[in-house]
């Protein structure tokens, strides 16, 4: 399982990349591996106002469908439209393919996310 030190993670297997007051959100290598071959990605709408825990979108694979939850509150400022035509890139490059970007509403929520080491420990516990 691949992780990156510059990201924050959730126990639902989303990653967060902070860029100033914005955050890009995607699914982790663990999530894409668990899902299998991704065939469809449902994106949110730019301008949507979301609260942490809301559904951000959905990822469908040949064996399962899974909702993606936003770990942070904010307004959707961009979506990765390339995923509509090439959803399989989530399998190939899970940390380069973000689903949506949010303008953060409450930076304090970042304290609820896991750093790389804590996420690796969490995943190791799930595999047993």
Image: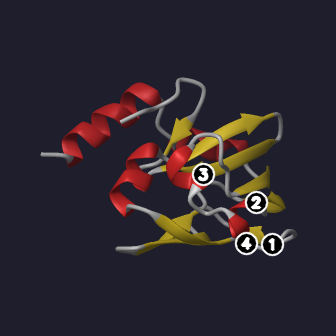
Q: Nearer the viewer, residue 89 or 57?
A: 89
Point out the tag, 3 or 2, that comes first from the N-terminus. Answer: 3
Mark 4 to mark 2 CA distance (whole Å): 13 Å
Point out the tag, 4 or 3, that comes first from the N-terminus. Answer: 3
Q: Disc 1 marks which residue?
A: 48
Mark 4 to mark 1 CA distance (whole Å): 7 Å
Q: Position of residue 111 (x, y in %)?
A: 56, 38
Mark 4 to mark 3 CA distance (whole Å): 12 Å
Q: Disc 4 marks which residue?
A: 44
Q: In the image, which is nearer the foreground, mark 1 or mark 2?
A: 2
Q: Give neighbour class at mark 2: few <14, some 14-19, many 20+ (Cα, 10 Å).
A: few
Q: In the image, which is nearer the foreground, mark 1 or mark 3?
A: 3
Q: Is residue 40 above or below residue 92?
A: below
Mark 1 to mark 2 CA distance (whole Å): 19 Å
Judge whether residue 63 can be spotted in this image.
Answer: yes
Helix, strand or loop at mark 1: loop
Tell me the quadrant of the picture where the C terminus can be found: top left
Are the residues flagged by discs 4 and 1 in contact, CB closer than 8 Å? yes
Point out the tag, 1 or 3, that comes first from the N-terminus. Answer: 3
Q: Residue at x 38, y 61 (%)?
A: 36
Q: Which mark is residue 82?
A: 2
Q: Which mark is residue 26?
A: 3
From the viewer's perspective, is 63 left or right of 50? left
Q: Residue at x 34, y 33 (%)?
A: 120
């Amino acid at each position: 399982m691949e992780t990156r030190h510059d990201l924050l993670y959730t126990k639902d297997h989303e990653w967060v990349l902070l860029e100033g007051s914005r955050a890009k959100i995607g699914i982790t290598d663990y999530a894409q591996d668990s899902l299998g071959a991704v065939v469809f990605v449902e994106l949110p709408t730019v301008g949507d106002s979301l609260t942490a825990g809301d559904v951000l979108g959905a990822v469908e694979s040949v064996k399962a469908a899974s909702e993606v939850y936003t770990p942070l509150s904010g307004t959707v400022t961009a979506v990765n439209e390339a995923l509509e035509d090439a959803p399989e890139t989530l399998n190939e490059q899970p940390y380069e393919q973000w689903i949506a970007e949010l303008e953060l509403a409450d930076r304090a929520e970042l304290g609820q996310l896991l750093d790389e080491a804590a996420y690796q420990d969490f995943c190791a516990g799930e595999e047993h």
